[in-house]
């Protein structure tokens, strides 16, 4: 009996919600494009991202052309971004840039696309759990960097250019640290050739990063473990020239112990 009552309640609630949705659509059926836009913008300004995006969607569906539809196409990208809907935000920004290549808001579309990939936080838990960007999958970081780079290259005078440059610098350092972490992991696992190659990638692709010193240390130790004395000594020479106070200029061992030998 209890189950039947519960099931009936669920059906009634579902019907009520569906009815509300239909009623809401019916209520807006006579709205003009301007009315849709004003309502959506009001929700956006009040940080009601989901409500705003739904109204923008209805506006674009009913009035796909015109200045209100065009403005909705760029503002919905921001609404999706603030909701954490990364894929939808990127798709909306790309769509706007493709449909309106001559719009003065193309730089903003590129900025939103890059921001959506930036992912500085970790969603709902980001306030409590801090994870280094270097510890995450670098794919989004690389795409974000390319997005900011495109913006700065195409629109050097954009109001978003300076912020994009700062984010690019942060992303470069995060990517360099990611590569270094991978190199250290290989070193700890005894994959010395892979460690040396990955450390070399850090030096080649991120020559101005502070991680360059650590990458050289990995190369010295990896080559030493493989018995490649000539390559080891070449790496030590470069290390000594750039960082004369580094312990490895006189030693062949990495400063950091293996992770499984924590007692050392």
Image: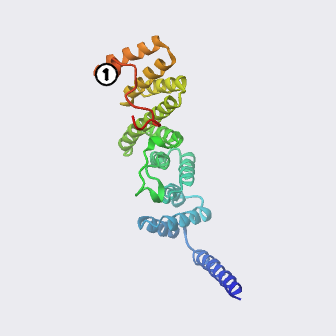
Location of residue 76 with respect to 13 vertically, above or below: above
Extreme residue in the bottom direction:
1
**Number of marks:** 1
Query: Which corner quadrant holds the C terminus?
Result: top left
The percent position of residue 195, horizontal first and vertical second, equals 51, 26
Q: For the residue carrying disc 1, how many other residues have a C-alpha within 10 Å: few (<14), some (14-19), or many (20+)?
A: some
Extreme residue in the front direction:
263
The residue sitting at 52% across, 65% down in the picture is 50
The residue sitting at 64% across, 77% down in the picture is 18
Location of residue 240 with respect to 39 vertically, above or below: above
The residue sitting at 63% across, 81% down in the picture is 13
Query: Which corner quadrant holds the N terminus?
Result: bottom right
Extreme residue in the top direction:
230
The percent position of residue 172, horizontal first and vertical second, equals 42, 35
The percent position of residue 229, horizontal first and vertical second, equals 46, 12
Q: Which residue is mark 1?
A: 243
Disc 1 secondary structure class: loop
The percent position of residue 30, horizontal first and vertical second, equals 59, 75
Q: Is residue 189 left or right of residue 174?
A: right
Which residue is nearer to you in this view: 35 or 94?
94
Location of residue 234 with respect to 36 vertically, above or below: above
Which residue is nearer to you in this view: 6 or 69?
6
Which residue is nearer to you in this view: 26 or 226?
226
Q: How is the image coloured?
A: rainbow
Which residue is nearer to you in this view: 92 or 186?
186
The residue sitting at 42% across, 54% down in the picture is 129
């Amino acid at each position: 009996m209890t189950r039947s009552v519960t099931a009936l309640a669920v059906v009634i609630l579902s019907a009520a919600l569906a009815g509300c949705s239909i009623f809401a659509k019916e209520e807006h059926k006579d709205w003009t494009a301007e009315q849709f836009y004003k309502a959506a913008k009001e929700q956006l300004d009040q940080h009601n991202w989901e409500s705003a995006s739904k109204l923008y969607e209805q506006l674009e569906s009913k009035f796909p052309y015109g200045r209100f539809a065009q403005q909705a196409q760029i503002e919905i990208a921001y609404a999706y971004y603030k909701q954490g809907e990364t894929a939808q935000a990127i798709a909306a920004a790309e769509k706007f840039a493709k449909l309106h290549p001559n719009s003065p808001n193309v730089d903003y579309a590129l900025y939103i696309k890059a921001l959506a990939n930036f992912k500085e936080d970790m969603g709902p838990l980001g306030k409590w759990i801090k994870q280094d960007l270097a510890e995450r999958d670098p794919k989004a970081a690389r795409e974000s960097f390319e997005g900011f780079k495109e913006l700065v290259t195409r629109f050097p005078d954009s109001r978003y250019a300076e912020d994009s440059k700062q984010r690019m610098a942060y992303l470069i350092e995060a990517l360099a640290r990611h590569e270094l972490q991978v190199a250290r992991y290989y070193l700890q696992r005894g994959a010395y050739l892979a460690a040396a190659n990955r450390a070399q990638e850090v030096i080649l692709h991120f020559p101005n990063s502070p991680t360059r010193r650590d990458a050289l240390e990995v190369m010295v130790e990896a080559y030493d473990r493989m018995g490649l004395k000539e390559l080891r000594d070449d790496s030590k020479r470069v290390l000594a020239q750039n960082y004369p106070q580094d312990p490895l200029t006189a030693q062949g061992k990495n400063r950091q112990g293996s992770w499984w030998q924590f007692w050392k």
